[in-house]
Structure formats: C-alpha cells, structure tokens
Image: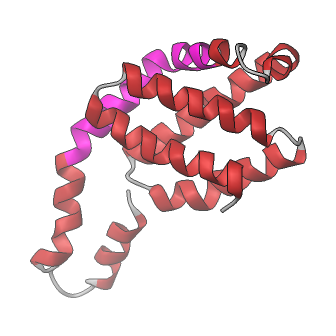
Amino acid sequence: MNNALLASIREADGRYLSDPELRPFDHLVDAFQTRVGLYNHVRDHGKELVLNALRRLMQTPHRQVVQEHAQQCQRDMLFTLEYVSKGILLNDEDGFMEEYLVWMQNIIRSFNRQSACVVAYRLLKEEVRSTMPGDQSNLMVLYLDKLIEALDTGI
C-alpha cells in the first residue's frame, strides 16, 4: 500500500481519520480495478509487449545491442514490467522511484547502454499505448516515463 496512506494511518493514532485524510483511500479504491486489470494484462501479455518492442528495436541503429544481448534485454524488460505492475498494484510510486529507478539507472550506466535502453523503453511505451486499455495504459506510461527520464537524463 502507498507509503503516504500508511503514514496517515500511523499519524492518526488515537483518533479517526478526517474526510480529507480519507480521500487518498477513496482514490485507491476507485482505481483498484484498473490497477488489478493492468497487473493481469502485464502478467498475461508482458512477454509479447517486450518481444514486439525488441523487434522494433532491431529496426534502429541499436540492432547490434539486441543481437548481442537479446536474452538480457528481454529479461530486464520483463522484470521492469513486473516491478512496475507491482508498484502500480500497490499504488507505490515512491517505492518505485526510490528502489527500482536508482538501481536500474546504475546498472544500465555501468554497462554504458543508456541510449539503447532509452529507445527500447520508448518502444515498449508505444506497445503499451497501442495494446492496453486507456486507463491501464495511462498508469503504466507514467511509470515508464519516469524510467525513461532516469535512464536518459538521470534522477
């Protein structure tokens, strides 16, 4: 669950939450079906999304990266989709930012593959936009945009 929501509960020790303090819970409940749908869609179609993005990456100047590192690219992109899906399911954007983005940015930079990864994740974002329902796509794209920005320019 979102850290801000948990903090509200902890801060309300000995009292009930006010209506303004409950609004984030209302939002979480309202969007929960979308989050579960997104999670299920990525679980069921994540590999297809990644493979389509990698096929498209083969048509770019980064073809050699895919030829040499296809399995690692696929593994990392699938892991990214899984991690993002869990973050979205839990409504935990802060955890995604603090844990995953910093880790991924450091790994990619250490292998000097930022430019290929930025293009790969942009292509993955396009696959998400074209295949997922709009509300799910919008949530996923928010996280992918943060990842792309971190890889491209840093956090």
Q: Residue at x 53, y 58 (%)?
A: 95
**Residue 88, percent across and down?**
41, 45
Q: Give the image quarter of residue 63.
A: top right
* Image position of 87 (left or right of 28): right
Q: In which quarter of the image is the N terminus?
A: bottom left
**Residue 75, percent across and down?**
70, 25
Q: Hey, which residue is sitting farthest left in the picture?
A: 19
**Of 48 and 19, which appears nearest the observer?**
48
**Of 35 and 145, which appears nearest the observer?**
145
**Of 36 and 81, which appears nearest the observer?**
81
Q: Residue at x 58, y 27 (%)?
A: 123
144 versus 128 height, above or below? below
Q: Report the magenta residues as a range.
A: 31-53
Q: In which quarter of the image is the C terminus?
A: bottom right
Main SS of the magenta segment? Answer: helix
* Image position of 65 (left or right of 93): right
* Count of numbered marks: 0
